[in-house]
Amino acid sequence: MTTVTTQPPTALTIAGSDSGGGAGIQADLHTFAAHAVHGTSVVTSVTAQNTLGVTDVHPVPPETVSAQLDAVLSDFDVRAVKTGLLPDETILSIVAERAEAGDLPELVVDPVLVAASGDKLFTGDFGAYLERLSPHTIVFTPNIHEAQALLGGEITGLDDMREAARALARYGSQAVLVKGGHGKDPEKATDVLWTQGQILELSAPRVDTPNTHGTGCTLASAIAARIAHGHPVAQAVGGAKRYLTEALTAAASWRLGAGPGPVHHHHGRKSTVL
Ligand SMILES: Nc1ncnc2c1ncn2[C@@H]1O[C@H](COP(=O)(O)OP(=O)(O)OP(=O)(O)O)[C@@H](O)[C@H]1O
Ligand SMILES: Cc1ncc(CO)c(N)n1
């Protein structure tokens, strides 16, 4: 049987490798594939990690990060870019220079500062994210802890999340999504989106699951994938959140490791082996 397929748009993830396969580059490429997007990748860092935590972080040499960027950007028509783990300020600067040069279209920035396990993943000054990347960003996606680390102060509820989104938007990002996965509401997972001067709340039922590893990477990649398909920001964010809630629900009974495991990125698709 011959299947005729439409050519997929290309997206790029600039992120770290997660040996456990649930977050980072691995989550991003799964998510792009699930959205019928061709995924290209620039590996910034190799982490040794599993569902229990991170045991080693090895930044890729800056010239190898630049060479990967050159290779991808000189050949592919990249429609959207997502950044995840940028291990230090040198690598953040390389990415920021490409953004300043206009080489990174529709840039979704997930500021990966500290792993869920508490391990520090970005060794630089957090302000570099705001000063260097935000002016070139279409959607900036901190979680509550990252927003606190970037702004100072404490975020204890929805009012604080709204205020944080407004404050982060002043650094120039076209939209800011403050993610509420670590919020206290047992019923709902509510994120706050600032876009075009307006605040929107995106709520989904809180899925009862231990498997939340890589939710932030998955959400940001799904946003980038939808933008690569031409969706406007608010629609891309809403669609990405629905995709993630389904991925969390579909993997709730999985026990792939002893700690918080990955989500089911391909929940919408029948496996070719089954
Ligand atoms: N149990 C859950 N049920 C439904 N949605 C969830 C749940 N946990 C997290 N989310 C959603 O997942 C997305 C990522 O949010 P979160 O605040 O966990 O990001 P993160 O901390 O960056 O992720 P990561 O754990 O990958 O570092 C948000 O849309 C959040 O609302
Ligand atoms: C490589 C990598 N990127 C991002 C995160 C955040 O979930 C992680 N744990 N590992």
Image: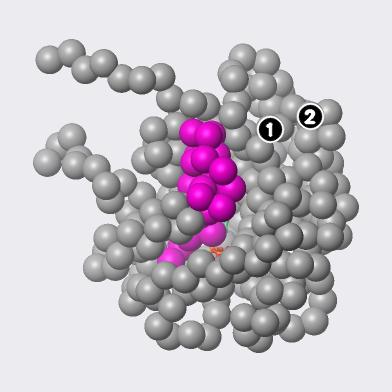
Task: Kindly indicate the quadrant of the structure image that contains residue 62.
Answer: top right
Name the secondary structure under disc 1: loop
Name the secondary structure under disc 2: loop
Q: What residue did someone put label 2 on?
A: 102
Q: Is residue 198 above or below residue 107?
A: below
Residue 81 point in image, percent of width and height: 62, 37
Residue at 71% over, 55% down: 196
The magenta stretch spans which residues? 212-237
Callout 2 touching callout 1 (CB < 8 Å): yes
Residue at 65% over, 86% down: 156
Q: What residue did someone put label 1 on?
A: 105
Residue 272 point in image, percent of width and height: 18, 35
Observer-nearest residue: 132 or 85?
A: 132
Disc 1 within 8 angstroms of ligand 2 (CB): no
Q: Which mark is residue 205?
A: none
Residue at 71% over, 32% down: 104
| Residue 142 visible in this rendered orientation of the protein | no
User: Could you tell whether 191 is left or right of 268 in the image?
Assistant: right
Residue at 18% over, 13% down: 2
Main SS, magenta region, reads helix
Observer-nearest residue: 112 or 183?
A: 183
Task: Kindly indicate the quadrant of the structure image that contains residue 269.
Answer: top left
Residue 51 point in image, percent of width and height: 44, 64
